[in-house]
Image (cartoon, rainbow, N blue to C red):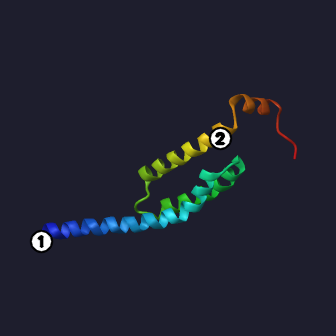
Amino acid sequence: VKRFYAEKLRINRGNNEAQWNHKYMKIIESPVQTIERAEDLKSIQMNVGVLMKTLSNIFESSRFYKEARMVSFLDRLLQVITLKIKKRITLGKALSEASQGPRSA
């Protein structure tokens, strides 16, 4: 009987965590998809700020999304963004534009 209640508690905790995971994933789904599908860097730039604020709120309020999980998610997100930037900007182009100075509006 004791083992049964221990397992029931473990399952209930897992269920609770899964419900929160679902809630948080629905919240960040739109900005993450926008970043994944972005064809230009401006779209990424516009959504990263929104996503970071949302992730900060999740981190502060969640019992489940703490350091390890948040770092893992941010690492994967950074990989996606880095690949998109690499596809559009070469080091030579970046250095060339930097040497020309800031553009006027």
Residue drawn 66% across the image and 51% down it:
38
The residue labelled by disc 2 is 85
Badge 1 local density, few (<14 within 10 Å), some, or many (20+)? few
Residue depicted at 40% across the width and 62% down the height: 63
Judging depth in this view, the residue of 92 and 59 nearest the camera is 92
Locate residue 5, reporting x and y percent: 18, 70
Question: Mark number for residue 1?
Answer: 1
Lateral position of residue 1 relative to residue 62, left or right: left
Residue drawn where x is 29% and y is 69% of the image? 12
Front residue (pair 79, 33): 33
How packed mark 2 is, by other alpha carbons closer than 10 Å (few <14, some 14-19, many 20 or more), is some
The amino acid beneath tag 2 is Ile
Alpha carbon separation for disc pair 2 and 1: 57 Å
Q: Is residue 16 above or below residue 38?
A: below
- View extreme (left): residue: 1
Could you tell me which quadrant the N terminus lies in?
A: bottom left
Is disc 2 placed on a helix, strand or loop? helix
The reply to whether callout 2 and callout 1 are in contact (CB within 8 Å) is no
Q: Earlier in the sequence, mark 2 or mark 1?
A: 1
Q: Position of residue 84 (x, y in %)?
A: 63, 43
Q: Quadrant of residue 100?
A: top right
Identity of the amino acid at label 1? Answer: Val
The residue that appears at 60% across and 45% down in the rendered structure is 81
Q: Seen in the image, is 19 located left or right of residue 35? A: left
Compare residues 62 and 14 and report the one nearer the observer: 14
